Image (cartoon, helix red, strand yellow):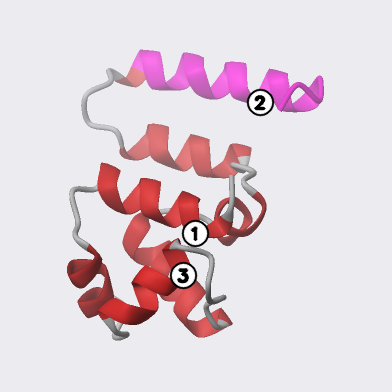
Amino acid sequence: MTLGKRIQELRQTSGMTQQDLANLTQTTLQHISSVEQGKRTPSLLVLTKLGKQLNASLDYLVFGKESYLDIITALKLDNSLEDEAKKALIKLIIVMRKAKII
């Protein structure tokens, strides 16, 4: 999947329009559209703003790799899980990381 497709997928999952994302990142609708279509590459500044607004690491946006630290952070912030479940999942992620599964 390309950078533009990852941005588009995250934006749509978040329920944002291209205009919403453009406003939040202080860029234009045309720029967001061009990035999603793969016609333009965002600057590092815009890429950083996109990551922040889409709750995605630069590693994920650029390379499609989700860092295990991102997953742990997301688990810690998830209010729908009980603390014991969070702890168990975090331990599992750490074991998987050590085994180089993720």
Which disc number belongs to residue 94? 2
Indicate which disc, 1 or 2, sits on the residue closer to the N terminus: 1
- Tell me which amino acid carries mark 2: Ile
In reply to whether residue 101 is colored magenta, the answer given is: yes
Question: Label 3: which residue?
Answer: 35
Identify the residue shown where x is 43% and y is 73%. 34
- Tell me which amino acid carries mark 1: Gly
In reply to whether residue 24 is colored magenta, the answer given is: no
Identify the residue shown where x is 36% and y is 72%. 32
- How many C-alpha atoms fall within 10 Å of the one at disc 2: few (<14), some, or many (≥20)? some
Q: Quadrant of the N terminus?
A: top right
Identify the residue shown where x is 49% and y is 59%. 4
Select label 1 or label 2 by which is in front.
1
Task: Please say if 83 is above or below 47.
Answer: above
Identify the residue shown where x is 79% and y is 25%. 98
Which disc number belongs to residue 58? none
Secondary structure type for disc 3: helix
Question: Label 1: which residue?
Answer: 4
- How many C-alpha atoms fall within 10 Å of the one at disc 1: few (<14), some, or many (≥20)? many
Task: Please say if 58 is above or below 45.
Answer: above
Select label 2 or label 3 by which is in front.
3
Label 3 close to label 1 by CB (< 8 Å) = yes
Secondary structure type for disc 1: helix
| Magenta span | 84-102
> Is 58 left or right of 28, judged from the image as shown?
right
**x and y percent of residue 85 in the render?**
38, 14
**x and y percent of residue 52 in the render?**
39, 65
**x and y percent of residue 40 in the render?**
53, 76
Q: Quadrant of the C terminus?
A: top right
Task: Please say if 23 is above or below 3.
Answer: below
Q: CA distance from mark 2 to mark 3?
A: 34 Å
